[in-house]
Image (cartoon, helix red, strand yellow):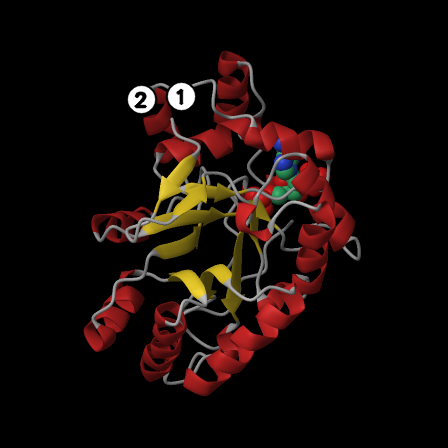
Amino acid sequence: MRHTFTLANGVEIPAVGFGTYKAADNQDEAVISEAIRQGYRHLDTAAFYFNEEAVGKAVRESGIPREEFFITSKVWRDNLGYESTYREFEASLQKLGTDYLDLYLMHWPRPVDMNAEWKDLDAETWKALEELYRAGKIRAIGVSNFLPHHLNNLMDRTGIVPLVNQLEFHPGYIQKAAVDFSQRLGIQVEAWSPIGRARVLKEPLLLELADKYQVSQAQICVRFALQCGVLPLPKSSSPERMRQNLDVFDFTIEDDDMHRLMTLPQIGWSGEHPDRERVPVDE
Ligand code: A2P
């Protein structure tokens, strides 16, 4: 298996990225620096994570050239719209201390206010993203948490297919309809919470497969995403587990085990759904 994915526009992305959301409370920069030391070059942040400054600082202080990193950020759901997207994009660049992004995503298809006119807002936001892309300020543009009807709205109004769709994806919550729909359109799917925020690690099937393949349950989750053609963005605060989550290229999950993982009953859902209020779940 290759260690990169190639987007429909030819841009290559390291196949495992580091998720920086709540990487470690108040210690973002140290955690991100550690992730870089452990080998991560693909860093996934967002305006809403309030850690873009820490990501930028860790990148600069690594001494590794900017071009060797793949940096993603996202425009928050309450800042959708043409002008606010331009503003938010510039703010992200400034916080990250860079003059371009590798990938910029619409974080959610709707504002927190579920009654808002999301269809127009999405199309206006996308127009700004497209212009920034054409101007060479972003190497790839995409969306996050978009279900097929959200993607259809965007494509109906703008005619442009996003390059990436980042979704919650892990054993027990694989969002098959959204993943299949995206992949059929040539959209690269990325997985947020590929380990189900550790909620799924005690699942007996994961324990069984970890034992069978002599890896950890988390490595099964990361490898599972890769074998589904989905780019995992695991988070961890420990150097050992960061390294472990990158060390997933010398074993293969057999087809039948993949099928068993794909057909698990729902477990580990975050409680987030783009068209619903957040449902509280036990962490
Ligand atoms: P920790 O920071 O202590 O490593 P996700 O990326 O799916 O949201 O999952 C993140 C959670 O999974 C964090 O709580 C993290 O805890 C835990 N985690 C990450 N990698 C591993 C691993 N290799 N083994 C066990 N737990 C892990």
Please, is residue 148 above or below residue 168 in the view? Answer: below
Give the answer, above or below, for where 125 lies relative to 193: below
Please name the residue shown 56% across and 42% down the image. 234
Q: Is residue 167 left or right of residue 64?
A: left
Please give the name of the residue rendered at 57% of the width and 43% of the height, measured from the top-left corner.
41
Front-most of residues 64 and 85: 64
Percent coordinates x, y for residue 99 in the rendering: 56, 67
Q: Which residue is mark 2?
A: 255
- Mark 1 belongs to which amino acid? Ile
Determine the quadrant in which ligand 1 lies. top right
Q: Quadrant of the N terminus?
A: top left
Classify mark 1 as within 8 Å of ligand 1 or not, answering yes or no.
no
Rounded to the nearest angstrom, the CA distance separating label 2 from label 1 is 7 Å
* 226 left or right of 210 in image: left
Which residue carries the number 1 mark? 253
Under mark 2, the amino acid is: Asp
Q: Is residue 138 left or right of residue 10?
A: right
The percent position of residue 80, horizontal first and vertical second, equals: 45, 79
Residue 149 at x, y percent in the picture: 26, 66
Residue 157, image quadrant:
bottom left
- Residue, x 46% and y 63% (percent of image)? 104
| Pointer 2 local density, CA inside 10 Å: few below 14, some 14–19, many at least 20 | few
